C-alpha cells in the first residue's frame, strides 16, 4: 500500500489532463466573454450660455422624435424635458396629447404646456422607449428680468432637467430612460475648453472618478421595488461666520448660490424683510468628512451673488449654482446613490 505522500503515475497523468482541459475551458469562456466588450462612455459636447444674467450655464443638443437638434439648458436642479412648441412645429415621431402640465422654477418663472411622448436622442444615444416631455406653449417670467430657461434667447429652446427625484415626478429624467450603463452614471464638466466651439462635456456611462482629490457625497435616498434618490446631499456650510449642516442641491440651472432659511445666524430673514436678499459675504461649502471645500469664495453680487430667501421648509436648505460645476467635475451614480466631485483640470471662471 502506498503512503499518503506517494503519487501514482496514472493518477498524476489523469490529474494533469484534467488541469489542461480546465485551462482550455477557461480560455474558451474568457474568449466568449471578451467577444462582448464593455460599453464605452458616450461623450456629449456642451456649450455655455453667456447671455446677460446666465453666467455660463451648460447647453446641450437633443432631438425629439424626428426633430432637428434642439439646444436646451442642461439643468441638474429640475426633472424632465421641456421644449418650446415652436421648435417642434414640424417634427414627426411625437405622440401629442391634450394633458396639461406646468412647473415653476426658483426664480419665479413658470412653464405651462401639454405632454408629448417621443424617443429622445442625446449625443448618439437614444432612449429605449418613448419618453414623456412638455411641449411648452406658455411662459411666465414673474419678476425675473430673464426667464431661467433662456427661452427668450435667440438659440435656446428648452430645458432638460436631469435631476434624480422619484416615482412621483410627472415627467422623467430622459437620461434614466437610456440603456445601461448610460442611464446609471454620468459626469458633467462645465467651463473646460474641449474644443474651440465647446466648453464642457456630458459623459454618459462615465467611469468611476480616479482623481487624487475626490469628494463622495451620499444622496438622501428612497428604497423600494426600484431605487430612487433625492437630489440632496448633506454638506457643511460656512456663511458669513455662521456654520451649519444643511441638505444641499447642486443646480446647474441656477446662476447663484441660494440659502433658504428663516433664522440663519448673521443673515437672519425678518418677517418684514423682502422675500429675497443678496449678500456679499465669504462662503465655503464642503462634504462634512472631506478636507477640501466644494466651493469657497467671497461673493461678488455682480458675478457670484448669494441669495438668502425665507424658507418654505422647516430647516435651512442650500443650493449651489453653476459656479460649483466650474470648480468640479460632477459624477452622478444612480446605482450607488452617490455624487462624486473631482477638481476640474482646467476650470474657467463663469462670467455674467
Image (cartoon, rainbow, N blue to C red):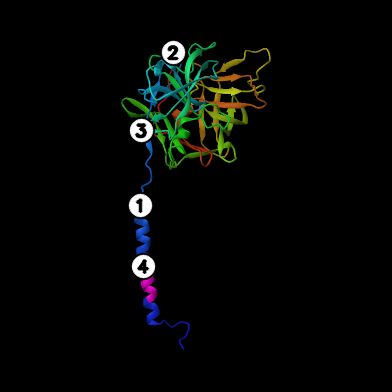
Circle 2: element type? loop
Circle 1: element type? helix
In the image, taking residue 267 as reference, residue 335 lies left or right, namely left
Q: Residues within 10 Å of mark 4 (few under 14, many from 20)?
A: few
Residue denoted by label 4: 21
Question: Please, is residue 8 above or below residue 37 in the view?
Answer: below
Q: CA distance from mark 3 to mark 1?
A: 24 Å
The overriding secondary structure of the stretch rendered in magenta is helix
The mark nearer the N terminus, 3 or 4, is: 4
Residue denoted by label 3: 124
Quadrant, the C terminus? top left
Q: CA distance from mark 3 to mark 4?
A: 44 Å
* Residue drawn at 50 percent across, 25 percent down: 321
Please count the marks in the image.
Answer: 4
For the residues bearing labels 2 and 3, Cβ distance under 8 angstroms: no
Residue denoted by label 1: 34
Residue denoted by label 2: 152
Query: Magenta residues, as a range?
Result: 14-22
Amino acid at each position: 500500500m502506498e503512503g499518503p505522500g506517494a503519487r501514482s503515475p496514472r493518477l498524476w497523468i489523469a490529474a494533469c489532463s484534467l488541469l489542461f482541459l480546465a485551462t482550455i475551458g477557461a480560455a474558451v469562456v474568457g474568449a466568449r466573454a471578451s467577444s462582448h466588450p464593455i460599453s464605452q462612455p458616450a461623450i456629449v459636447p456642451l456649450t455655455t450660455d453667456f447671455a446677460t444674467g446666465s453666467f455660463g450655464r451648460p447647453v446641450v443638443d437633443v432631438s425629439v422624435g424626428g426633430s432637428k437638434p434642439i439646444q436646451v439648458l442642461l439643468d441638474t436642479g429640475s426633472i424632465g424635458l421641456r421644449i418650446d412648441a415652436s421648435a417642434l412645429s414640424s417634427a414627426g415621431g411625437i405622440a401629442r396629447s391634450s394633458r396639461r402640465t406646468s412647473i415653476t422654477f426658483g426664480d419665479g418663472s413658470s412653464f405651462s404646456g401639454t405632454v408629448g411622448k417621443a424617443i429622445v436622442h442625446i449625443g448618439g444615444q437614444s432612449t429605449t422607449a418613448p419618453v414623456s416631455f412638455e411641449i411648452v406653449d406658455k411662459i411666465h417670467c414673474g419678476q425675473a428680468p430673464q426667464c431661467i430657461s433662456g427661452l427668450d434667447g435667440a438659440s435656446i429652446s428648452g430645458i432638460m432637467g436631469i435631476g434624480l427625484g422619484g416615482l412621483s415626478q410627472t415627467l422623467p429624467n430622459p437620461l434614466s430612460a437610456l440603456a445601461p450603463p448610460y442611464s446609471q452614471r454620468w459626469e458633467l464638466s462645465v467651463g473646460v475648453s474641449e474644443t474651440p466651439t465647446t466648453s464642457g462635456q456630458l459623459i454618459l456611462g462615465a467611469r468611476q472618478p480616479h482623481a487624487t482629490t475626490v469628494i463622495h457625497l451620499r444622496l438622501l435616498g428612497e428604497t423600494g421595488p426600484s431605487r430612487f434618490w433625492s437630489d440632496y446631499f448633506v454638506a457643511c456650510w460656512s456663511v458669513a461666520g455662521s456654520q451649519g449642516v444643511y441638505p444641499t442641491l447642486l443646480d446647474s440651472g441656477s446662476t447663484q448660490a441660494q440659502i433658504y432659511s428663516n433664522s440663519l445666524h448673521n443673515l437672519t430673514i425678518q418677517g418684514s424683510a423682502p422675500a429675497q436678499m443678496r449678500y456679499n459675504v465669504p462662503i465655503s461649502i464642503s462634504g462634512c468628512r472631506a478636507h477640501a471645500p466644494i466651493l469657497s469664495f467671497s461673493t461678488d453680487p455682480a458675478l457670484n451673488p448669494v441669495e438668502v430667501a425665507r424658507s418654505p421648509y422647516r430647516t435651512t436648505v442650500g443650493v449651489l449654482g453653476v459656479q460649483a460645476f466650474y470648480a468640479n467635475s460632477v459624477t452622478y451614480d444612480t446605482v450607488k446613490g452617490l455624487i462624486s466631485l473631482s477638481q476640474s483640470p482646467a476650470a474657467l471662471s463663469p462670467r455674467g
